[in-house]
Amino acid sequence: MKLAERMSRIGVETAFDVLVRARKLEAQGKNVIHLEIGEPDFDTPRHIVEAAQKALDEGWTHYGPTQGLPELRDAIARYINRTRGIKVGPEHVSVVPGGKPIIFFPMLALLEPGDEVIYPNPGFPIYESMINFLGAKPVPMPLVEERGFVFDLDRLKDSLNDRTKMLVLNSPQNPTGGQISREDLKAIADLVRDRDLIVLADEIYCEIYYDQPPVSITTFPGMLEKTIILDGFSKSFAMTGWRMGYGVMPTWIVDAVTKLMVNCASCTASFTQRAGIAALDGPWDETRKMVAEFHRRRDAFCDGLNSIPGFRCARPLGAFYAFANVRDTGWKSKELADALLAEAGVACVDGACFGAYGEGYIRFSYANAFEKLMDAVDRIKKFMASH
């Protein structure tokens, strides 16, 4: 026996590979500062943990509805309506174990071999992985640093054709921290509104922003009925290990996602869904404190990187990643990222791991203690001075 051919087209997340290498170095006695994984370094807020404990005590340990508990879907719909300024109901919500199923399931349900999908590059690697896996054609849209790491709208217009079946948007964005402006989103909506395609709007970082709140493309006329919103609990509430995400989408896509979900995982854990209700219904104080601390770290860490010869790092507008341009160092980004881990003990990710247009950049997650971030800057500075 051998693996099916399609397995040769599936990718991975390199950040987890870097984590394994970093852990191996730590086991050998090396001190490593972890700036590779996109995970808040804060504990899940206490009231959410207590809601999960209460749910366990009350027996929420059995199968639930495949689409998600009605009470949670209602809470999600209320939250989406409040934050996006749109009107959806619980019938538009699918609750799944993590955010990635809202990439995989809709793509699996909608794409045929040869269909084209436009997606951000550099971008979350699972977009391209799933497009390739399904035999569709990935159409990378370069994120332009000079435009704040958002699409060149003229290039987007030229890339659209009758084979385009999906457009992936991510704002705030991983790995760049870029945020699509209202003006650009309106222009994108005008370009795709009358086309036979679906927009996958990855809004998982929507609560982590530092100036203006991000705008959802669903707020523009005609876009709600052709958009899938991807959101979840991992980033906003430091709940990465709880594995709970959701999609908000037209009901005909909900039906397809529910069929795939019942074939894949039956349902999302019931007690975690009870905790999700507590998360959305508040209080939100801990989330606000977390974002304020990310803001403080962003400013200091990016300023620190910019003090290193050869490094140039714009302050991100959202998420918790610094995407540093290292072309002027004379190093290839992968070689530099590998050397920073091996010699300086700073775990980071080569920008090309997020797509070909990420070459020349390194992604640092500043979801780590302020003191460790400043230590990382010092280590990088000393490494570069000696090389």
Image (cartoon, rainbow, N blue to C red):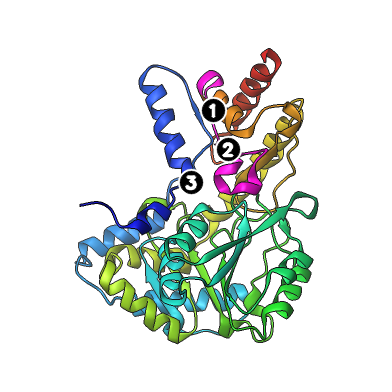
Q: Is residue 85 magenta?
A: no
Q: Which mark is residue 100?
A: none
Q: Which residue is mark 1?
A: 338
Task: Quadrant for residue 215, please give it.
Answer: bottom right
Q: Is residue 199 visible?
A: yes
Magenta range is 342-363
Residue under pointer 3 = 39
Percent position of residue 346, x then y:
54, 27
Lower position in the chain sequence, tag 1 or tag 2: 1
Q: Residue 253, how many percent across, how many down? A: 44, 81
Measured in 3D between alpha carbons, the distance from the residue under mark 3 to the one under mark 2, in whole angstroms, is 17 Å
| Residue 350: mark in rendering | 2
Q: Residue at x 40, y 57 (%)?
A: 47
Query: Which of the 4 quarters of the picture holds residue 95?
Result: bottom left
- Name the residue: 57% across, 82% down: 226
- Residue 387 as seen in the image, left or right of residue 73: right
Residue beneath the point at 25% across and 51% down = 2
